[in-house]
Image: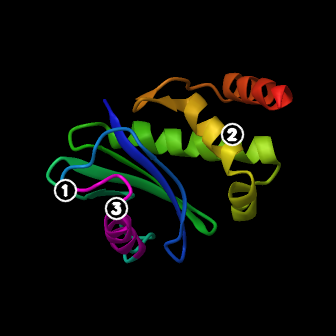
Amino acid sequence: MAIQFFICLNKQGILRLVRWFQPFSGAAPNNQATIAQIYKLISTRDHKHQSNFVEFSDSTKLVYKRYAGLYFLMGVDLHDEELIYLSHIHLFVEVLDAFFGNVCELDIIFNFYKAYMILDELIIGGEIQETSKDVLLERVNYLDRLD
């Protein structure tokens, strides 16, 4: 299991967080066209009648979830189990919510370094490192106190 990338977009397709763990086939990691293509694909889907998983390329599947005005998505290998990644997207949002106290898009915009800190505690090098919300919050709160 390997996560290729983690992206957070708002409903207008504006990038809020991005972490590339592997070079994306045929595209530079900062390629805005690739991100626009991903946004176009997930924003046009019927969220009530279609799943949160969609094939994106020959080797990549998108696992995504929309929370309020933000899309959180992971690019994963085609043969990986989608529900594991969907649960980790939810865990990430729960930790953000507990850390910021009812997180919103502005929290991510103005405290992006803290959002990246939380993401880095959850995923390192494309591999999931922690699955416990309490442990993640303990680590993140400790790191926040160091500032």
Residue at screen point 51% across, 38% down: 88
- Gap in Å between the C-alphas at discs 2 and 1? 30 Å
Please indicate, yes or no, whether residue 37 appears anywhere in the rendered image: yes
Residue 29 is covered by the magenta coloring? yes
| Mark sitting earlier along the chain (1/3) | 3
Q: Is residue 132 left or right of residue 71?
A: right
User: Mark 2 highlights which residue?
Assistant: 95
| Mark sitting earlier along the chain (2/1) | 1
Q: Nearer the viewer, mark 2 or mark 3?
A: 3
Which one is nearer the viewer's eye here, 2 or 98? 2
The region drawn magenta spans: 27-43
Q: Residues within 10 Å of mark 1 (few under 14, many from 20)?
A: few
User: Mark 1 highlights which residue?
Assistant: 57
Residue 88 is covered by the magenta coloring? no
User: Mark 3 highlights which residue?
Assistant: 31
Q: Quadrant location of the N terminus?
A: top left
Please indicate, yes or no, whether residue 45 appears anywhere in the rendered image: no
- Gap in Å between the C-alphas at discs 1 and 3? 15 Å
Residue at screen point 50% across, 23% down: 129
Q: Is residue 3 above or below residue 66?
A: above
SS at badge 2: helix
Q: Residues within 10 Å of mark 2 (few under 14, many from 20)?
A: many
Residue at screen point 37% across, 71% down: 36
Residue at screen point 29% across, 54% down: 28
Q: Name the spot of residue 23 as percent of width and height, x first.
A: 28, 43
Which one is nearer the viewer's eye here, 86 or 60? 60
Q: Is residue 142 above or below residue 92?
A: above
SS at badge 3: loop
SS at badge 1: loop
Q: Quadrant of residue 52?
A: bottom left
Q: Name the spot of residue 146 as percent of width and height, x first.
A: 82, 25
Q: Is residue 26 left or right of residue 85?
A: left
